[in-house]
Image (cartoon, rainbow, N blue to C red):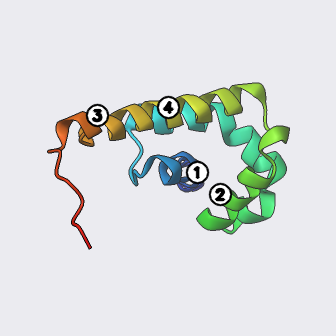
Amino acid sequence: MIGLSITTAVLLITAASAGESTPTTKQRDDVRKACMSDVMRLCPREASARDRQGVRACLKANFSKTSQACQTSLRTAGADREKQSSSSRPRSSDRPNTPAPKP
């Protein structure tokens, strides 16, 4: 159970920048596999307290100390989520070209 909470917190790091709130099952599993030992090593107090915000802050502060696998997994999850997010946003070329109101 603690693994799921920590993984969710970890994924919130990438979700915040992508404007998403719910990780996919694959993203959650990939990050759990890659980052669980880093969370337990770098953020044991936050992990044992199931403090999601604390884990997120701890991993942000210690990102450079996480394993290469964890960093890659987080970056991949963030890139995947950004693609999903941007594909649902209208592009500037899709918006009508309306002139700005004159003062």
Q: In the rendered structure, which disc, 2 or 4, sits on the residue that comes first in sequence?
A: 2
Q: Is residue 84 above or below residue 12?
A: above
- Residue labelled with disc 3: 87
- Residue labelled with disc 2: 56
Which amino acid, by three-letter code, is at mark 3?
Ser
Which amino acid, by three-letter code, is at mark 1?
Ile
**Are circles 1 and 4 on residues that touch, CB within 8 Å?**
no
Give the number of the mark in front: 1 or 4: 4
Q: Which one is in front, 21 or 4?
A: 21
| Residue at figure coordinates x 76%, y 26% from the top left | 68
The quadrant where residue 100 appears: bottom left
Q: Report x, y in % for residue 33.
A: 61, 32
Could you tell whether 10 is left or right of 39 in the image? left
Q: Is residue 8 above or below residue 70?
A: below
Which amino acid, by three-letter code, is at mark 2?
Arg
Q: Report x, y in % for residue 65.
A: 85, 40
Q: In the rendered structure, which disc, 1 or 4, sits on the residue that comes first in sequence?
A: 1
- Residue labelled with disc 4: 79
Q: Report x, y in % for residue 35.
A: 68, 38
Q: Which one is in front, 78 or 33?
A: 78
How far apart are the two marked residues, 2 and 3, measured between alpha carbons?
26 Å
**Are circles 2 and 3 on residues that touch, CB within 8 Å?**
no
- Residue labelled with disc 1: 13
How far apart are the two marked residues, 2 and 4, measured between alpha carbons?
18 Å
**Are circles 2 and 1 on residues that touch, CB within 8 Å?**
yes
Give the number of the mark in front: 2 or 3: 3
| Residue at figure coordinates x 42%, y 44% from the top left | 23
